[in-house]
Every structure is written in C-alpha cells, then in structure tokens.
Amino acid sequence: MKDFWNARYKEESYAYGNLPNEFFKQQLDKLKVGSILLPAEGEGRNAVYALSKGWEVMAFDFSKSAKDKAQNLAKKNGFHLEYQVIDVLDFETTKKFDVICFCYTHFPSSIRFKASQHLLKSLSTKGYVIFEGFSKKQLGKTSGGPKDISMLYSIAEIEKEFEGLHFEMLKEQEIELNEGPYHIGNASVIRFFGSK
C-alpha cells in the first residue's frame, strides 16, 4: 500500500490537484483561525490553503513522496509546512487542535475505528471535525476511491467511528468531483461537520 502511494505521489502532476477540497474550504472559512491537524494529507493542497488563511498547521502521511510534494507546494506559495512521515497509529502529539480534517482518509478497515478514535484524542475540548470521504455507493464508479468496500464509509459506520462528536451536519450525497487526474466525475460521498 505504501509503495502504491509513493509511486502515485512521485508523478509530476498533483494527483488530486493543488487547490483545496471544496467542502473543506467551505467549512474552514466559517471558523475562527486556530490550529489544525491534517492526517493522511497527501500532497498538501488543504494544508497550503489553511496556511494561506493564517492557520497553524500540522500534517502527516505515511508517504515520503507525499511530504516532498506537499513541502514543495508550500514553499512555492511562500510557506513553511510542518509535515511528518508516519503511520496513523504511530502519530503522537501533546498538542490539542481546534480542527481535525479527514479528507479522503480511507484507512484499512482493520485499523480504521482505532485510527479515528486515536486522532480524536488530539481534538481540543471545543474543537471541530471536517470530514469528506467516499461512501459505499462509490464502489464501481470511476471517479476515484478504494476498490475494497470495507474501506468505504456508511452513515452508521461514521456515527460509530466518530462517537463522542455532535454531528452538526452529516449527509451522504452525489457530487461532481474535479480534483486532479484521480478525482474526476460523479461520486458518492459522505460529508460531515462535527463538534466535540
């Protein structure tokens, strides 16, 4: 799995574009600027947007190629990006973040619940979670995402995996993706905005 992502992120073009995810941008723009954690951040598109708005950003991914690409994007835009190469369950910090964003963080089903709960420990008492990921109805569509249904989400799974959050908005919907070469076309996603 790590080899797959390192190879994808070594490609010259940005796999999912260099502009922020639309839902992430919409939700972040409503919030008071603070600190944000971006797990499985890939090539840095959301991190660089958050930095441009004055957020204190910490990002990580298990792909070294992702970090290289993200830091190049940040540098090109005049920012320094704090970015670790680490597996999600090995990520540790004493910091509490105002926001955690899960943007297409499709962890293997064997660790996903544990990973979500592990990351939520780093959310501040009055913090927020922004989430967008592919739903189980995405299987068979050509617009991206895992080909293993167990890595795709259902509303019920979200409610269980993010137990302890108040869901201010939680919905499954069909959208048109246009995020780089690997996220293009009709897609079925789950989006939520939650608070602790």
Image: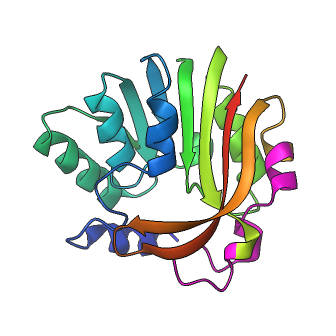
Q: Residue furthest top?
A: 125
Give me the residue at 36% from left, 23% from top. 55
Relative to 67, say whether 117 is above or below: above
Is residue 140 found inside the magenta-colored segment of the image?
yes
**Quarter of the image where one finds residue 58:** top left
Is residue 177 found inside the magenta-colored segment of the image?
no
Give me the residue at 69% from left, 80% from top. 139
Relative to 186, say whether 51 is above or below: above
Which of the pair 126/71 is nearer the observer? 126
- Horizontal relation, residue 65 to residue 84: left or right: left
- Horizontal relation, residue 183 to residue 165: left or right: left
- Horizontal relation, residue 132 to residue 72: left or right: right
**Quarter of the image where one finds residue 89:** top right
- The image position of residue 52, as x and y in percent, is 26, 31
- The image position of residue 79, as x and y in percent, is 18, 32
- The image position of residue 117, as x and y in percent, is 74, 37
Magenta segment range? 138-159
Which of the pair 27/10 is nearer the observer? 27
Relative to 169, say whether 87 is above or below: below
Quarter placement of the C terminus: top right
- The image position of residue 22, as x and y in percent, is 45, 50
Give me the residue at 15% from left, 40% from top. 77
Give me the residue at 12% from left, 45% from top. 76
